[in-house]
Image (cartoon, helix red, strand yellow):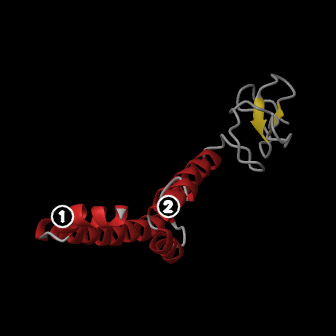
Amino acid sequence: MFGDLIDELLGPILESPIVELASRLCLLFFIVFSAALIFWTWRDAQRRGAMPWFWALVVLIFNIFGWMIYLVVRPPEYAEDARERELEIAAKEAELHASGKACPSCHRPAGPDFLVCPWCMTKLRKECTSCGRALDLDWSICPYCKTKQ
């Protein structure tokens, strides 16, 4: 009896062309939104080096919840940015090593007058027997006081 009353009241409203059009537009929006979400996830995962097909499939199956999971577990930076940062670090290390301001063993910065590396204790230079200044290991004479070593 109560169901018949609801059918009587809501039947004409639910069967009207405006409600039918609105429901189809909502369905179309949901389909387009889902496709865009899948594409965005695939592209973002590809740029971050995070298994793009897997995450696109997760978003396809779980929709917005899969997308939220991806946002939580995705790598924090793009793979290209990580490679660029690693190249910059390698270039800086090579520059330090070439200028003699880095330890040849651990590649950490070392001052020009350090006799040993403060981190790994590698002998970097020797001390002049006369003036006490730091000399390269292969020098046979002190350039500061002209003393043979």
Classed neighbour count for the residue bearing mark 1: other residues with Cα under 10 Å, few (<14), some (14–19), many (≥20)? few
Name the mark nearer the viewer: 1 or 2.
1
Asked if residue 41 is positioned above or below residue 111 in the image, the reply reads below
- Pick the front one: 4 or 32: 4
Give the CA distance from mark 1 to mark 2: 33 Å
- Residue 52 drawn at (x, y percent): 49, 73
Q: Is residue 80 left or right of residue 131?
A: left
- Pick the front one: 131 or 28: 28
- Residue 139 drawn at (x, y percent): 77, 42
List the single residue furthest toward the top: 131
Instruction: State the residue at coordinates (23%, 65%).
Output: 8
Asked if residue 26 is positioned above or below residue 136 in the image, the reply reads below
Classed neighbour count for the residue bearing mark 2: other residues with Cα under 10 Å, few (<14), some (14–19), many (≥20)? few
Q: Is residue 77 left or right of residue 25?
A: right
The kind of residue on which mark 1 rests is Ile
List the single residue furthest toward the left: 17
> In what quadrant of the picture does the N terminus appear?
bottom left
- Residue 46 drawn at (x, y percent): 46, 70
User: What element does badge 1 sit on?
Assistant: helix
Q: Of marks 1 and 2, which one's residue comes earlier in the chain?
A: 1
In the rendered structure, find residue 130 and report the number of the disc placed on it.
none
Q: Is residue 111 left or right of residue 125?
A: left
Please name the residue that numbered disc 2 is placed on. Answer: 65
> In what quadrant of the picture does the C terminus appear?
top right
Instruction: State the residue at coordinates (71%, 36%).
Output: 110
In the rendered structure, find residue 13 and report the number of the disc placed on it.
1
Asked if residue 25 is positioned above or below residue 76 in the image, the reply reads below
List the single residue furthest toward the front: 1
Instruction: State the residue at coordinates (77%, 26%).
Output: 133
User: What element does badge 2 sit on?
Assistant: helix
The picture quadrant where one finds residue 13 is: bottom left
